[in-house]
Image (cartoon, rainbow, N blue to C red):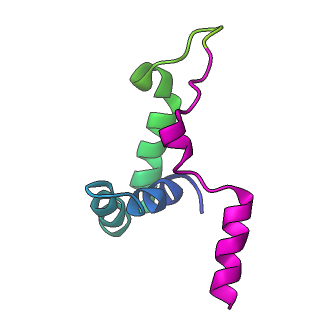
């Protein structure tokens, strides 16, 4: 899975309205058009979204945001529960 298919698959797993956009995009818009739009955004992403200046650092996540992530042990435990 590449380009627009991947982006729309990810969108379809997000809350509304992204879920509907992801599903509708895959069903209603031909791949060659979606991929063309994807490439256009990719080529112009810095002018659209901006770019970090040299020396800027990535933001460190807060404890609240970190609590939303699973660590490897949590994933393994979850998989074990499914197997039981």
Residue displayed at 38% across by 65% down: 26
Q: Work out whether 72 lies above or below 37.
A: below
Tell which residue pokes out farthest to the bottom in this image. 84
Residue 24, quarter of picture: bottom left
Asked where in the image residue 82 lies, by quadrant, the reply is: bottom right
Closer-to-camera residue (33/21): 21
On-image quarter of the N terminus: bottom right
Instruction: From the top left corner, tell me how far across and down residue 51 is, in percent.
Output: 52, 18
Q: Position of residue 9 (x, y in %)?
A: 47, 62
Image quadrant where one finds the C terminus: bottom right
Asked if residue 23 is among those painted magenta in the image, a careful observer would answer: no
Relative to 84, say whether 2 is above or below.
above
Where in the figure is residue 39, as x and y percent of width and height?
50, 41
For the magenta stretch, what is the residue range? 57-84
Count of number-bearing discs: 0
Q: Decide if residue 21 is on the left or right side of residue 82.
A: left
Q: Residue at x 64, y 74 (%)?
A: 78
Name the residue located 62 percent from the left edge and 56 percent from the top edge.
70
> What residue lies at 55% left-to-right and 16% top-to-bottom?
52
79 to the left or right of 48 = right
Residue 78 colored magenta?
yes
Q: Dividing the picture into quarters, in which one does residue 14 lie?
A: bottom left
Query: Above or below — where is 61 with respect to 28?
Result: above
Decide which of 81, 36 is in the foreground and name it: 81
Q: In the image, residue 4 lies at what x, y percent?
A: 48, 54
Name the residue nearer the viewer: 58 or 29.
58
Whether residue 11 is situated above or below residue 37 in the rendered picture: below
């Amino acid at each position: 899975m590449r380009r627009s298919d991947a982006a729309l698959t990810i969108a379809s797993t997000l809350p509304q309205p992204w879920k509907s956009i992801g599903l509708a995009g895959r069903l209603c818009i031909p791949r060659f058009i979606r991929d063309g739009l994807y490439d256009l955004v990719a080529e112009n992403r810095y002018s659209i979204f901006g770019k970090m200046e040299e020396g800027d650092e990535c933001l460190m996540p807060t404890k609240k945001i970190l609590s939303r992530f699973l660590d490897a042990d949590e994933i393994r435990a979850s998989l074990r529960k499914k197997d039981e």
